[in-house]
Amino acid sequence: MTEKFDIIVVGAGILGVASAYYLQKNNPNKSILLVDSQPDAGQANTAMSAAAIRNMFSSSTNQLLTDTSIDFFRHIQEDLDFDLTLHFCGYLWLLSERQFKEPSVQTWMQRMEANNIAYRVIEKSELQKLIPGLVTDFSGDEEAELMNLNNVDYALFGAECGVLDPSLLVQFYKDEFLKLTKVKPRFNLHVEQLLLEAQPGLGLPGEPLVWQNKLVTGIKTKQGEIHADKIVVAVGPWTNTLLDPVGIPSYVKAKKRQLFMVAASDHQPLEEILFAKGFSKTGFIPFTILPSGGVYLRGVPEEKSFWIGCADKVGRTYKYTMEEDDYNAERAYYEQSVYPVLSKYFPAFSNARPGNMWAGDYAYSVDAIPLVYEHSGVIVVTGASGSGIMKADALGRITDALYRGESEAELYGGRKMSSKALGLVNRDVEVESVLI
Amino acid sequence: MTEKFDIIVVGAGILGVASAYYLQKNNPNKSILLVDSQPDAGQANTAMSAAAIRNMFSSSTNQLLTDTSIDFFRHIQEDLDFDLTLHFCGYLWLLSERQFKEPSVQTWMQRMEANNIAYRVIEKSELQKLIPGLVTDFSGDEEAELMNLNNVDYALFGAECGVLDPSLLVQFYKDEFLKLTKVKPRFNLHVEQLLLEAQPGLGLPGEPLVWQNKLVTGIKTKQGEIHADKIVVAVGPWTNTLLDPVGIPSYVKAKKRQLFMVAASDHQPLEEILFAKGFSKTGFIPFTILPSGGVYLRGVPEEKSFWIGCADKVGRTYKYTMEEDDYNAERAYYEQSVYPVLSKYFPAFSNARPGNMWAGDYAYSVDAIPLVYEHSGVIVVTGASGSGIMKADALGRITDALYRGESEAELYGGRKMSSKALGLVNRDVEVESVLI
């Protein structure tokens, strides 16, 4: 006797729990089993996130996915009284004159205006008042020149952006799912492979054979096989590991990203930067991206600290799939690659060393737009390219729309997206150019 | 002392030698080193090909790439008197009524008409005269029903298609390249990795660091490092292995494909099929694709045999990179997956067993259109998705145009293609749906 459900959702990261919730909500009579290799939901890469949310993307697609998701997160916290520690501290991109005038940045701004994504340009003089501790001009600094450091001439500020606690967001979707489902999720359960079966099976050696119709009908685990009519695969940087063996195309890459916590308490100059008051009602600094090296910082007012990260590009390894070692942050990376840039723009960080650090993997797609598509009995949700949390609500709804065979998904607030727009081929998306 | 060239072309398969030739032809003063891990050019996956050529693709992009390449191959053989054993035996797609009416097939035919790709529809009655040994109707055959076998109601025939010997095509490009270059190619030389260097290097630990400009400046081999201003990476299913470690995006998948040689000599019914006279002046059967299971056959009149292959889809493993074992064809694959279909449509193959077999890998792109793009000092030529030989001339010219910074590549016959159309992002292509 093997078990059988209507749907199995593999992966209880943010995309898995959001998908499970919308699937159960809109298909109340279906039995849905949620499985994850970790002891609870949201404990793998979701937990490693910088956990910031923004609607300031260059592509209309990502703008729509995030704008509606963020509206829903606000609804969770403000209307449903479920605290996500969501703070609208904003996002702040620091740019040189040259960067500001680049066609890609101009296109980005135009698309935000066209799609009513709120942002404003801050001039250098205002910025210097808002963050007195920021160095904006490296003229005559030979070291800065060797480091390719751009001056700060402008900033783009988005007020509808901010930070939240992803474990609380996971908790929300999981709780709501649990209220609806009769099937207890299974944790600590590693899915070894997808089961691809001939339809119908003929009992021949080597099945499924090339000339047979084939469908993924379940999962194989150490506790045996579990079957379902549909398998949702929401496993981020492990996507290739599950899909490649059964020949379902995926085309995502895993890439390690690291975060370093630097305490601001007991160091007045850092506290002044952290609690920069002029940007928003939150009274702390926006998520700030430096104009060089991809270095960014996120304020964490609850713990009086910063999380420092880096949107590294060429030179850092792409991987086929996530490896255990990718959870280990590297002190040398902070010291050699992050700190030199950070301390140039913010001298208050001089000699500051991380008190804690962690790492995880992004799952990149070619165009940095998520993938949601159906293939051979599987619905794949992946490729969020490092911004899955802020798109989770929309992606969960799209997954459900695809399951129900709806041509359009209704996102929060009533806006719609074709449920096939995020397909692997025949994608209907603009390439995303604003990656962090 | 490390060696330094203007260009290194990594990979002397068909795409590598065609690229090397056009690069040297149009940049006569540049020193170009061609390297390959095999003892000579074209000995890896190029040699494993079914070696058929067609312009009958569904995408305008693949039509243009192949149509101009095939024209050039004809020019090589007819005008330059270099025998490629190129035979225009044609391509023959067998289709059921239902398949014929599918939107994808209708779009395919419309695009061929719009782009002047020659083809004609053959009705069943004519087909039965042309190939008396073909079974077209499985009514009442329960076994055929279990095998999902489609009847044959129509065929699409393309006369400007055929077969050639890829080793001769490789020889042509290699010879022409050797006439121009002063640098002896190096074979039996495995490229272990690309060298990514900081620009400028500062002698710091951990270089290249995140904030440094970076460029691929050479290759690492067992015989030491070799440097160049530009590296062309034309390594097909090994693309990820070279690009991922330096963080250059690739997004291709390797997949094993197999061929089985079945002798037609001394078996009159098979000889009759092989030498089906009515299709072309060549007097032998077109490259024929059965309507089920992806099974195809290619006549090899010189050796009085067929090569039998199978365009398998879901159920056959995608791989990160090619593995040695992928060169081994599997007899069980022929017996279980290919033979049952083949012998149903062509009973003359009953009890025929392969006398020889071989295998190699395809390098798939997401949309089954090749990739040619520049990134961090590298020009990548990959993703030909199993039809690299028939596109090789156009791809070599596009690679050279990209190197010279030309916005357009002039293909054989004067037709043009944007040299960025095949880029990894901002691609300007139609998705290819006619895969074999």
Image (cartoon, coloured by chain):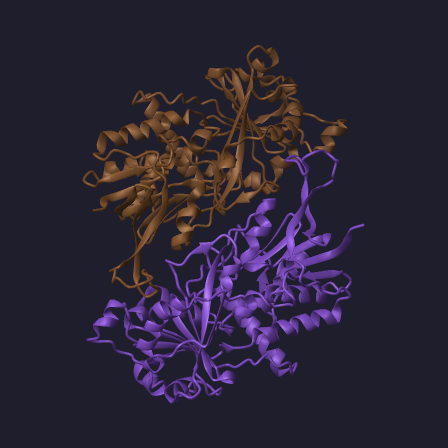
Chain colours: A purple, B brown
Q: Position of residue B364 (x, y in %)?
A: 49, 43
| Foreground residue among B404 and A353 | A353
Image point 22% across, 32% down: which residue? B180
Whether residue B11 is situated above or below residue B422 in the rendered picture:
above
Image point 50% across, 60% down: which residue? A325
- Total numbered badges shown on the rendered structure: 0
| Foreground residue among A172 and B205 | B205
Q: Position of residue B92 (x, y in %)?
A: 54, 27
Asked if one can make out residue B253 in the rendered structure from this viewpoint, the answer is: yes
In the visual, does B23 lie left or right of A29? Answer: left
Q: Position of residue A168 (x, y in %)?
A: 61, 76
Whether residue A142 is situated above or below residue A253 in the rendered picture:
below
Whether residue A178 is situated above or below residue B344 in the rendered picture:
below
| Foreground residue among A88 and B245 | B245
| Residue B190: quarter of image | top left
| Foreground residue among B429 and A272 | A272
| Residue A286: quarter of image | bottom left
Image point 62% across, 37% down: which residue? B101
In the visual, does A64 lie left or right of A41? Answer: left
Asked if one can make out residue A413 in the rendered structure from this viewpoint, the answer is: no
Image point 55% across, 20% down: which residue? B355
Residue positioned most to the right: A1
Q: Position of residue B269 (x, y in %)?
A: 61, 13
